[in-house]
Amino acid sequence: MKFIQADVLKQKPTDESKLGFGKIFTDYMFTMKYKVGQGWYDAQIEPHRPIAFDLATTVFHYAQGIFEGLKAFKNEKGEIRVFRPEENFKRMNRSAVRMCIPEIDEKLVLEGLFELLKIEKDWIPTSPGTALYIRPSIVATNVALGVHAGTEYLFFIILSPVGSYYAHGLAPTRLLVEDFYTRATVGGTGEAKCIANYAVSLRAGEEAAKKGFDQVLWLDANEKKYVEEVGSMNMFFVIDGEVITPMLTGSILPGITRKSCIELLKANGYKVSERKISIDEVIEAQAAGKLDEAFGTGTAAVISPVGMMEYKGRDYVVNNNEMGKITKWLYDTITGIQTGRLADTHNWVVKL
Amino acid sequence: MKFIQADVLKQKPTDESKLGFGKIFTDYMFTMKYKVGQGWYDAQIEPHRPIAFDLATTVFHYAQGIFEGLKAFKNEKGEIRVFRPEENFKRMNRSAVRMCIPEIDEKLVLEGLFELLKIEKDWIPTSPGTALYIRPSIVATNVALGVHAGTEYLFFIILSPVGSYYAHGLAPTRLLVEDFYTRATVGGTGEAKCIANYAVSLRAGEEAAKKGFDQVLWLDANEKKYVEEVGSMNMFFVIDGEVITPMLTGSILPGITRKSCIELLKANGYKVSERKISIDEVIEAQAAGKLDEAFGTGTAAVISPVGMMEYKGRDYVVNNNEMGKITKWLYDTITGIQTGRLADTHNWVVKL
Ligand SMILES: Cc1ncc(COP(=O)(O)O)c(C=O)c1O
Ligand SMILES: Cc1ncc(COP(=O)(O)O)c(C=O)c1O
C-alpha cells in the first residue's frame, strides 16, 4: 500500500475533555479511487488535506454517497482495539448496492484501516468516554449533470479523536416524537447508511433542538404510528420486563450497537423482542407505570438513556429521568468490552 | 462584482449536434460564500476550475445541498433570452428553508447570473433544441461530522451548453410505473429541489433503464396509488378532453414548466385540473380509449411525449406511441416563446 508522508504533523489536542465530536482530524487518511471499467485502484495512505473537486461533480448535485461510523480505543496497556469493524464494511457494501455504488473489497479496506490506525495510534485518546472515531465514506466523483449513477468514485477513511456525543454526556436525553416530518419509507433508502437520509432529517432535528430536545424520535412514514429510530440511534424500550426494539422493516438503519445489545441481552437471559412497537403502546405502558427504561444505541453515543419524550404536546417521563438498570448494564458491558476492561466474550474486538 | 480572469479559455464545442446534457462546461462560474454571523459574501465571477474541499466537509457526509435548473437561449438576432429565472431563485429559496440552508438575495444572484451570461454569450448554442443550461447550487462547506445544518455554504452557478435531454430527442418515451421503490413522502423533502431526492431515486432509475425504460413514473409512497411525477419531469394526462396534472401535495416538485403549461393551457381555453389522479384512472382511461395524451414537463426536456407505460408487468400504449396534439402545441409554444419565434405573451423571458 502506497504511503505519502506529510510535510508537517499537526499539534495533537492536549485536553481530552474538550474534543467534542468530529471537529478535529488526524494527519493521515486512507483513499482509493474507482472508475467504471477499471474497478477500485490507487489504495493509499496520504496526508489528510483538501482535495480539488470540480463543482459539477455528481455528489454535489445528486448526493450519491454512503458512509460508516465506528470507533477505535486505546487502553492503559497501549492496546489499539477496534469494535466490530467487519460489520461496518459489510453494511457499507449493502448501502453501496442500494445506492448504485460499486462494492468495495472488505478485506482490503480493513487492512487499509488497520495500517492507518497503526500510523495514527498517538491520536487515539484514552480518557473514559473518548475514542478515535473512524469515518469511511464513498462519494461519486465524476463530472456530469445527467441524473445517473456515477462512473467514478472516491473511497476514503478519515479519523477524528472524539469525546461524548452529547454535550451533557450520559445524562438522560429528551426526545421529541415527530408526527409531521418523515425520514424514510419502506421502498426508500432508510436501511442504507446513505448521506441523503441525513439531509432529509436536518429540518426536524433543528426544530427539535430549538425547543430544547436532544433528538427526534421518528415514527413510520405511512401511519405515523410505529416507532422507528432516533437521528443516529436505534431505540429500545423495557416494558414489563420485556426488552423491545423495532424490527428492521426496511426503513430503519440496522445498527451494529443494536445488534450487539440484542446479542448481549439474549446471552444473559433477557427476553428480547424485535417487533413493531407503536408509540401508543409506549405511552400506555408509561401511564400504567410499566415503562421501566428507554434508551438509544449507536456508535457515537454507545448507549444513551432516554429521560423524557414529548408526543403531541404532552411529556412522558421515563424512569424518573434516571438511567435504568439494563441501560447501565449495557453501557458498562459494551464500553468494557471496547476498552478491554471486560473480557471480549463475543469476539467483537480486533486488537492491533 | 469581482471578476477573476481565466488564463486560457477553453475550446468551444464545434458540433452542436453532439452536446449531450451537462457534460461540457463554460469558462466562468459565479460563486458566493456564506458564514454564520457574516451572511453571504464574496460574490464573484471566476474561472470554472476545481475547488479544494476537506473530505470532512458537511455536504460529503450529510448531503446538505439544493440546486436549480434553467435555460438561456440565443436566437438568430443574437438576443440572449432567459426563461423565467426569477421563478427558479424563488423556488431555490423555498428549498433552502426546507433544508436549513440560508436564503439568498434573489436580486443579487439574478444580477450575477445575467453578468455571467453576458461574459459567456459565445457559449450559448443556437441550433433548434439546444440551449445553455444554467445550474445554480448551494452546498454546505463547513468541516464537521456532527449531524447538524452547516455553518458555512457555497453558492455557485455553472453553465453547460446542452442538446436534447433524451438521446432519442422528441420520440415518445417509455415509462416504468414504479410500485416498489419510493421517492418522497408528504412530510419529507419531495417538494424541495434538494440533492438528496435524486440519490434516493437512482436505484429505481437504473433498474428501469436496464429494462429499456427512459424514466420511472413515481406513485405516492403511502398507498402506491396516485401518480406523482417522473425523475425530472412533472406529469400531465389528457383524458376525454380534460388536461390533468397531479396536484402539489408536498411530495412533488412544483415545476416551472408545469406552471407555464397550466398558464398557457388555461389562457387558451383548455380545461385543466390539478388534482389527485390514480394510476388506475389512467389505465382505465387507456382501456376505454379515452387516454388521448400523456406527457412530462421539465426544463431539461421541455415537453416530452409519453408513448408507453408499463405497470405491474403490463404495457399501456398511449396515442399509438405518437406525440399528441396538445403535447405538440405546448412544445411548440414554449420553445417558441423561449427562442423568440413566438410573442412572449406572458412576459416570461428576460432579454439581455
Ligand atoms: C440513522 C441511524 N440509526 C442508527 C444508528 C446506529 O447504528 P450503529 O449502532 O451501527 O452506530 C446510526 C448511527 O450509525 C444512524 O445514523
Ligand atoms: C423531480 C423533478 N420534477 C419536476 C421537474 C420539472 O421542473 P421544472 O419544470 O422547473 O424544470 C424537475 C426538474 O427540474 C425535477 O427534478
Image (cartoon, coloured by chain):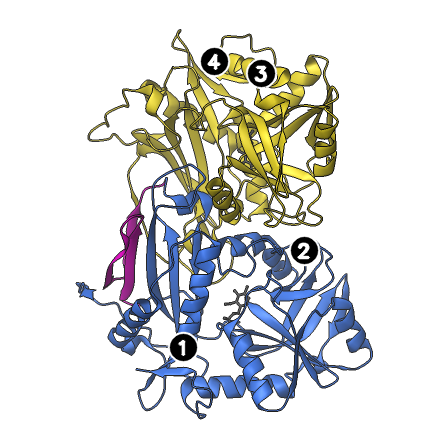
Chain colours: A yellow, B blue
Question: Tag 3, which secondary structure?
Answer: helix
Dividing the picture into quadrants, the one containing residue B123 is: bottom left
Location of residue A321 by image quarter: top right
* Residue B102 is a magenta residue: no
The disc label shown at residue B221, or none: 2
Q: Residue at x 50, y 84 (%)?
A: B334
Q: Give the label, 3 or 4, closer to the camera.
A: 3
At a point 30% along the width and 53% down the height, the residue shown is B34
Q: Nearer the viewer, mark 2 or mark 1?
A: 2
Q: Confirm whether residue A278 shows in the render.
A: no
Name the residue tied to disc 1: B131
Does the stretch in magenta take in B33? yes
Q: Write down the residue under mark 4.
A: A339
Position of residue A327 relative to residue B257, above or below, is: above
- Dot 4, crowdedness within 10 Å: few (<14), some or many (≥20)? many
Is the CB of the residue bearing disc 2 within 8 angstroms of ligand 2? Answer: no
